[in-house]
Amino acid sequence: MSEDAGPRKVNAEYAIEYLQEHPDAGLCCEDQRWWITPNANETDQTVLRLDAAEAERLKGDPRLRLVSGIAHASRSLWVVRRMT
């Protein structure tokens, strides 16, 4: 497979590590498609992909929180909780 084949598919463990290391990133879902965006303010970009089973595991992680009221009504977004 060539390197320009698009974002690679990852598991929930890798995805949570990515999200923790990139605090601006977010987990997105739309029409049963799941992806990690590098910037939660611009959810159209995709850096990693997840299948539905891995994404369901990830969205249930207590380190993530659902963001309400995002610009895309049909899209859901989760980000890492800010620990203070």
Image (cartoon, rainbow, N blue to C red):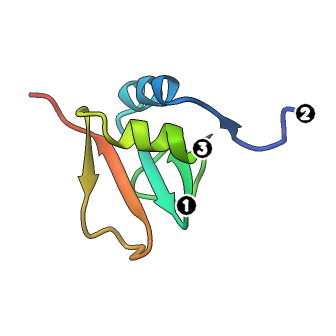
Q: Residue at x 40, y 37 (%)?
A: 58
Q: Residue at x 60, y 49 (%)?
A: 46
User: For this rendering, which residue is in front, 69 or 32?
Assistant: 32
How many residues crowd mark 2 within 10 Å: few (<14), some (14–19), many (20+)?
Answer: few
The earlier-in-sequence mark between 2 and 1 is 2
Q: Nearer the viewer, mark 2 or mark 3?
A: 3
Check disc 1 and report the residue beneath it: 32
Identify the image quadrant of residue 84.
top left
Q: For residue 51, which numbered disc appears in the image?
A: 3
Q: Relative to residue 63, is residue 7 drawn left or right?
A: right
Rendered-image quadrant of the N terminus? top right
* Gap in angstroms between the C-alphas marked 2 and 3: 20 Å
Check disc 2 and report the residue beneath it: 2
- The amino acid type found where label 1 is placed reads Gln
Q: For residue 9, which numbered disc appears in the image?
A: none
Q: Of helix, strand and loop, which one carries label 2?
A: loop
Residue 3 place in picture, x, y as percent: 84, 32
Residue 19 lies, with reference to residue 6, above or below; the image says above
* Gap in angstroms between the C-alphas marked 1 and 3: 9 Å
Furthest toward the bottom, the residue is 73
Identify the image quadrant of residue 68.
bottom left
Q: Relative to residue 77, is residue 14 drawn left or right?
A: right
Q: Nearer the viewer, mark 2 or mark 1?
A: 1
Q: Are marks 1 and 3 in contact (CB under 8 Å)?
A: no
Residue 12 place in picture, x, y as percent: 48, 30
Q: Of helix, strand and loop, which one carries label 1?
A: loop
